[in-house]
Image: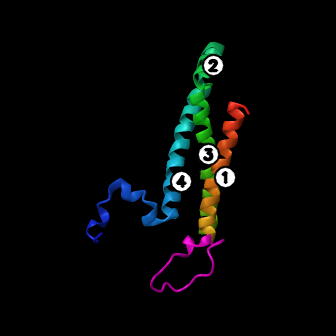
Amino acid sequence: MTNQDEHKEGIGGMINPRRYGVERVAYLLMRLSGLGLLAYFIGHIYETSTILKGQVGWNEFLELTQTNAGHAILAIVIAMCVFHTVNGIRVMLGHGGIGVGKPARPDYPYTPASQNIRHKIGIYSAIILAAIAMMYGLTVMFGE
């Protein structure tokens, strides 16, 4: 791939983990989980406002959400919440200089200190914890 063709990959190039590494995947998942949690927050506000319609309105909305699809969406929300929290803590610690290591002179080829093995372990830990939380949520909602 030439330098001129480098920027013609479109969205596929933006999410290509081989090109940018796991840091780009974490960045993308952080943004997507943030938007997903915002959408859930808005939906949750709407859901809780149905109590104003009385018991009938509340029960109608519960019939809509207490389905297999509703439970699967809640499991995804659990995973997004856990990933967003754990990855956010990793990012805050990195910005505070914790886990980054000593500053060094940026000699060629420069590798940012924020992309060291400790931060990659943090990213993988966030993904694994989110998957475990999602599986636990599915187990609770769907039974055994």
Circle 2 residue = 58
- Comparing marks 2 and 1, which lies closer to the viewer? 1
Labels 4 and 2: the sequence-earlier one: 4
- Comparing marks 2 and 3, which lies closer to the viewer? 3
Disc 4 from disc 2: Cα separation: 33 Å
| Extreme residue in the left direction | 4
| Label ID, residue 30 | 4
Q: Position of residue 2 (x, y in %)?
A: 28, 71
For the point 61% across and 74% down, the residue is 100
Circle 1 residue = 129
Q: Check contact, mark 2 vs mark 1: CB within 8 A.
A: no
Place residue 37 in its image quadrant: top right
Looking at numbered disc 3 in the image, what kind of residue is underneath it? Ala
Labels 2 and 1: the sequence-earlier one: 2
Q: Check contact, mark 2 vs mark 3: CB within 8 A.
A: no
Disc 2 from disc 3: Cα separation: 26 Å
- Comparing marks 3 and 4, which lies closer to the viewer? 3
